[in-house]
Image (tube, grey):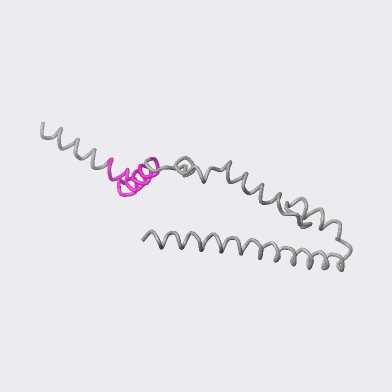
Amino acid sequence: MISLISKTISKISYFISKFQVKQFLPIVIVGLMLSATNRSPSLSNPDLSSKKSVDRINDLVQTENSERPKTTNEWDKQADETKDRPGEKMKRIGEQSADAVKEFGSMYGDVVERSSTELRNNTEKR
């Protein structure tokens, strides 16, 4: 009986040494942690839902009345149009850069105003 127990223990220890529990245990722990955490923040926070975010981005893109290209295809089309005319290309780059700076400047003021309002509200709560 003792030899049977001894053989069983030696087989288990041999299996464990081949299986390398030290490497397997961290994998199991990471797997458990990933399965236990909330993988979809949009379900817990409705403001982060992808559909709402996409709609907001599309609204922002569509409200800007700039002549600048917005998609990769538009950029490629414009590049093909001015391929042989470097002067025209430089002129468009200058105009589009100025337009982009104007748009950023108008957006930046709104962001600062909203952020400062939120900051005041947060400091008043304390």
Left or right side of 25 for 42: right
Q: Residue furthest right?
A: 84
Task: Place residue 105 in its image quadrant.
Answer: bottom right
Q: In this view, does 82 lie above or below 54?
A: below
Q: Which quadrant is the C terminus positioned in?
A: bottom left
Q: Main secondary structure of the magenta part?
A: helix
Q: Which residue lies furthest to the left in this view?
A: 2
Could you tell me residue 123's position as x and y percent?
41, 63
**In screen coordinates, is 84 left or right of 38?**
right
Total numbered badges shown on the rendered structure: 0
Q: Nearer the viewer, residue 23 or 4?
A: 23
Tell me the quadrant of the picture where the N terminus can be found: top left
In the orientation shown, which residue stands out farthest toward the front? 124
Q: Where is residue 55 in the image (x, y as percent from the top left)?
A: 62, 44
In front here: 66 or 76? 66
Picture residue at 30% right of the left edge, 49% below the top: 22
Q: In this view, does 75 lie above or below 89?
A: above
Write the residue at 52% across / 61% down.
115
Residue 29, given in percent of the width and then of the height, sits at: 33, 45
Considering depth in this image, is 5 or 30 the residue closer to the camera? 30
Q: Position of residue 28 (x, y in %)?
A: 35, 43
Q: What stretch is highlighted in magenta?
A: 15-35
